[in-house]
Image (tube, rainbow, N blue to C red):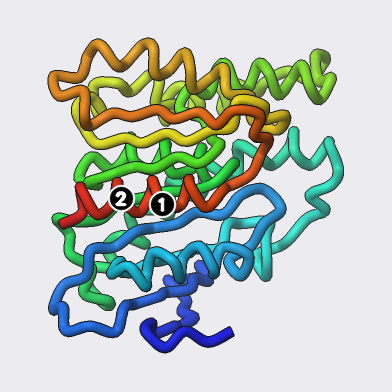
Amino acid sequence: MKYINTYERNVLIDDIPALILTPKNDAKLHPTVILYHGWGSSVEKQRFRGMILSNLGFQVIIPCSIHHGNRDSIDHTKVENAGKYFWKIIFQNIDESSKIIQYAIKEFNADQKNIGVCGNSMGGFTAAGVFATNIDLNALVVFNGSCNWDISNEIFIKSLNMYDVEIPKELQDKLDKHNPMKNLQHIINRPILMLHGDSDTSVDVRAQIEFYGEIKEMYTDPSRLEFITYKNLNHYVTTNMMEEAAIWFDKYLS
């Protein structure tokens, strides 16, 4: 499917494959959104969502995560692979994020004062970690992800029946370093929108409820933090969610 209002380019940012969607307009600098895909998803599967944002005036960059696509892909249906690779992928996404941001600014005229990040599921975990790590980013939208990684990890261990798996110290150190819940000083008063189905069986909403309860009283401007749950919704991104995300980015990336 072709879109007449968007320039579409596949690029390599060093060794990171990415799709860049740029609005066909006269803007010298583009408000830009980095969109991260989820576990077992792909750049191509996020293309339509990216096109929605692009047609609303945002440049969108969709990077490919390791162990997906052409980056040493694995079998994402195996439980043991989720336990082995899930957090490693997120941490590498975070490590690569500054490279992607700088590339967007230098090569694709991203407006460095108007760059946001979003993602669904594992991509939502990534987006939250990238936002906490890169303090110059201007807005965050998390679809069905988590900003409270300790709680989410406990739920994952229980749901995957991995009680006998010891968390390596290196992994725990990285969880502590990048966990948004443990970096509140870097994200307080920055625009955060969280969207989640209250019946999500893949990423339990309880982690987001606890995160929101912890941080909301710290905001001097409550309008910059919003948490919307969707009744009886499982692990899906809906049209209403995309509309809320577009409104959020329009408010804070302009």
**Which disc number belongs to residue 19?**
none
On screen, 229 above or below 8? above
On screen, 177 above or below 238? above
Q: Label 2: state its secondary structure.
A: helix
Q: Label 1: state its secondary structure.
A: helix
Is residue 1 shown left or right of residue 68?
A: left
Quadrant where the N terminus is found in the figure: bottom right
On screen, 147 above or below 109? above
**Where is residue 159 drawn, in percent x and y?**
78, 21
**Where is residue 139 drawn, in percent x and y?**
27, 44
The residue that label 1 is drawn on is: 243
**Which disc number belongs to residue 247?**
2
On screen, 170 above or below 48? above
Is residue 76 shown left or right of residue 100?
A: right
Is residue 210 shown left or right of residue 75?
A: left
61 or 67, nearer to the observer: 61
Three-letter amino acid code at the position of disc 2: Ile
The answer to whether the residues at label 1 and label 2 have Cβ atoms under 8 Å apart is yes
Q: Residues within 10 Å of mark 2 (few under 14, many from 20)?
A: few
Q: CA distance from mark 1 to mark 2?
A: 6 Å
Which quadrant of the structure image shows residue 223?
Answer: top left
**Where is residue 140 drawn, in percent x and y?**
34, 42
Residue pictured at 56% horizontal, 63% vertical: 46
223 or 164, nearer to the observer: 223
Three-letter amino acid code at the position of disc 1: Glu
Q: Residues within 10 Å of mark 1 (few under 14, many from 20)?
A: few
Residue pictured at 24% horizontal, 54% vertical: 250
